[in-house]
Amino acid sequence: MKRLILLFALLLGAAGARAQEGYVPAPENLAARGQFAADRFGVFIHWGLYAQPGQGEWVMQQKNLDYREYARLANSFYPSKFDARAWVRAIKAGGARYITITSRHHDGFSLFRSAATPYNAVDGTPFGRDILAELAQACREEGIRLHFYYSHVDWGRTDYWPRGRTGHGTGRPDGKEGDWAHYQAFMKAQLTELLTQYGPVGAIWFDGLWDHDSQPREAQPGIWGLYDQYALIHRLQPGCLIGNNHHLDPFPGEDIQIFEKDVPGENEAGFSGTAGVSRLPLETCQTMNNSWGYNITDRRYKSADELVRYLVRTASKGANLLLNIGPRPDGTLPEEALARLEEMGKWLAVNGESIYGTQAGSIPEQPWGVTTQKENKLYLHLFRPQPELTLELPGKVRSAVLLADGTPVSFKQKKGTVTLTIPEPTAATPDRVVTLEFR
Ligand code: H79
């Protein structure tokens, strides 16, 4: 019977695809897309019960932890130093314009009050506070947008169906079917809560479809009734953007395209080889060290300079950077993360004009750096000192200055080439920006 329901669902997926083909984003959705692209920099938060074992958010799968034993971590979920306002202030000072937080990850624990399951921060822990509600309020007060990550995969629920590649050692009754319709109803109930109880939601960020990447692409939207979920989200909040980290070309109904650990078009981490770069707003998510959820032994942090340049490189491809932090079990953000945020904030406070609201640069990546642009300005991002630079540029340059302090940069222009003589740097910086203004 359940197999029949699944088959039916897959067929519905195909029919739903036709309905979504006609998806016309609402005016507020188009406005939100523009705002999203202008924001350019967001902070990702991976937080849940997995912060306590401190081995990342995949610990349940990687160590084959029984879901009933794992669930006892809820009894000791008491992040006594959690202060939503402190998070938001640090993130905002870092120059980020939005926060994307894991409302529920593959372990199945919800960080928010949910009538659909007691396995949540309010009803299932001694802490008893709604993390998302506190964060939403702090975001509202500080004027920063809030997005929710939502996992399709669940390694603990017995109704979870269809099973994918992961979660076979977590004690779910394997070899026994789940209950597709029940799991669907559960997810829809939670999505409804997320979109009705926390004010405007900037985006819903789905994850997990790759667990079924052995299925043909056409069948994939039916696996979890994606198009039903998309329609629900856009009905509840037409301006809420939908993104899905499925590593494929965007499906109809999606509003942004996500790249996991890849600058669009590079496939450096190997997850994006199956996807082209679409015309939707783009977002690259990346870790500061090598973990998403808090990892107590992962000291391999990228330097602040590397992170600034990573942000600049994503912007030069016309993409946002969603940079991750995994808070500790006590609710604090690791000092390493705070220090990097602070450095990025300092650089952005001076050079933000060359990032926020810009588009991909017309000059592709060069040995010296990259470019971004906005209106009649082209920003040259010099990643290494460059006393002289000759560029082929149509159009007449009116002025050239260092963005940081307005120091003029002398230039000669003839027959479509510009030669710049760049003053010697006086202080170390990860990226020195020259603004070229065109007539
Ligand atoms: O939330 C973070 C991760 O927990 C989650 N997405 C980010 C944002 C994530 N983890 N891994 N992945 C996404 C990528 C999936 C990797 C896969 Fe596979 C490799 C899918 C298919 C091949 C692992 C190995 C799962 C199945 C086989």
Image (cartoon, rainbow, N blue to C red):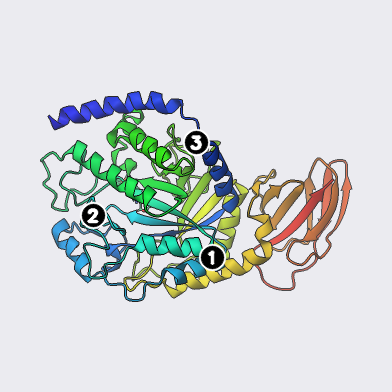
Q: Is residue 33 left or right of residue 396?
A: left
Residue 23 percent location from the top left of the image: 46, 29
Identify the mark at residue 240; answer none if there is no mark: none
Identify the mark at residue 92; answer none if there is no mark: 1
Is residue 308 visible to the viewer in this orientation of the structure? yes
Q: Nearer the viewer, residue 85 or 152?
A: 85
SS for tag 2? Answer: helix
Residue at image location 17% in from the left, 56% down from the top: 67
Q: Are marks 2 and 3 in contact (CB under 8 Å)?
A: no
Residue 245 percent location from the top left of the image: 40, 44
> Which quarter of the picture shows residue 100?
bottom left
> Which quarter of the picture shows residue 305?
bottom right
Q: Nearer the viewer, residue 286 or 244?
A: 244
Residue 114 percent location from the top left of the image: 27, 54
Name the amino acid, label 1: Lys
Q: Which residue is mark 3?
A: 276
Q: Is residue 376 left or right of residue 23?
A: right
Query: From the image, which quarter does the C terminus lie in?
Result: top right
Name the amino acid, label 3: Gly
Estimate how packed mark 1 is, as few (under 14), some (14 to 19) or many (20 or more) residues with alpha carbons within 10 Å.
Answer: many
Q: Nearer the viewer, residue 79 or 382?
A: 79
Name the amino acid, label 2: Gln
Q: Distance between the Cα atoms at labels 2 and 3?
A: 30 Å
Q: Which residue is mark 2?
A: 61
Instruction: Give the mark nearer the N terminus: 2 vs 3.
Output: 2
Estimate how packed mark 2 is, as few (under 14), some (14 to 19) or many (20 or more) residues with alpha carbons within 10 Å.
Answer: some
